[in-house]
Image: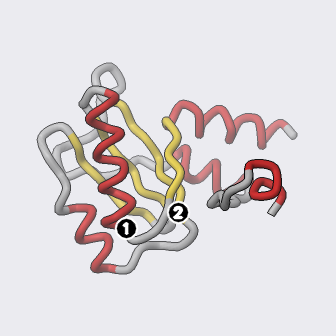
Amino acid sequence: RHLEDALGFAVATFVRTPAEVAAAAAYAPPFAIGPVASDDHALWVGFLKAAPAPANEAAVLALRTENDDFHVHGRELYWRIRARTMEAIRLGARLERALGAPMTMRNVTTVRKLAELAAVS
């Protein structure tokens, strides 16, 4: 409510405990096109309010390409991406439509740093 009051529009928020953030950061998604190689692939984590329905998960997986792979794990969507930023932005909007719900995306490096900060607190 405070964000909406300050910004003037509704803002979807997704709350996770420190343990949930740590679990999201440590998770190794089993992508269909093979494991993530740290030197040539970006990995993003999409946080959702709730786990997607099976039909929505299927709709997301139908968006796979040679550059984009997805894996749903509970309330998180893992996105292995090898595309330019503008292509990713367009696909991000399609992902939300396929999910039927808003999400917030963070690079796994950011998620890992947040997990470290929460563990120190």
Residue sitting at 26 percent across and 40 percent down?
35
- Name the residue carrying label 1: 99
Residue sitting at 78 percent across and 41 percent down?
119
- Name the residue carrying label 2: 48
Nearer to me, 116 or 54: 54
Which quadrant holds residue 82? top left
Nearer to me, 53 or 29: 53
Q: Are marks 1 and 2 in contact (CB under 8 Å)?
A: yes
Which quadrant holds residue 55? bottom left
Name the residue furthest right: 121
For disc 2, the neighbor class at 10 Å (few under 14, some 14 to 19, many from 20) is many
Q: Amino acid at mark 1?
A: Leu
Image coords of residue 51 (percent x, y): 47, 73
For residue 84, which numbered disc appears in the image? Answer: none
- Is 81 located above or below residue 8 in the figure? above
Asked whether the viewer can see residue 37, the reply is yes
Which quadrant holds residue 39? top left
Image coords of residue 105 (percent x, y): 50, 46
Image coords of residue 33 (percent x, y): 16, 45
Image coords of residue 58 (percent x, y): 24, 71
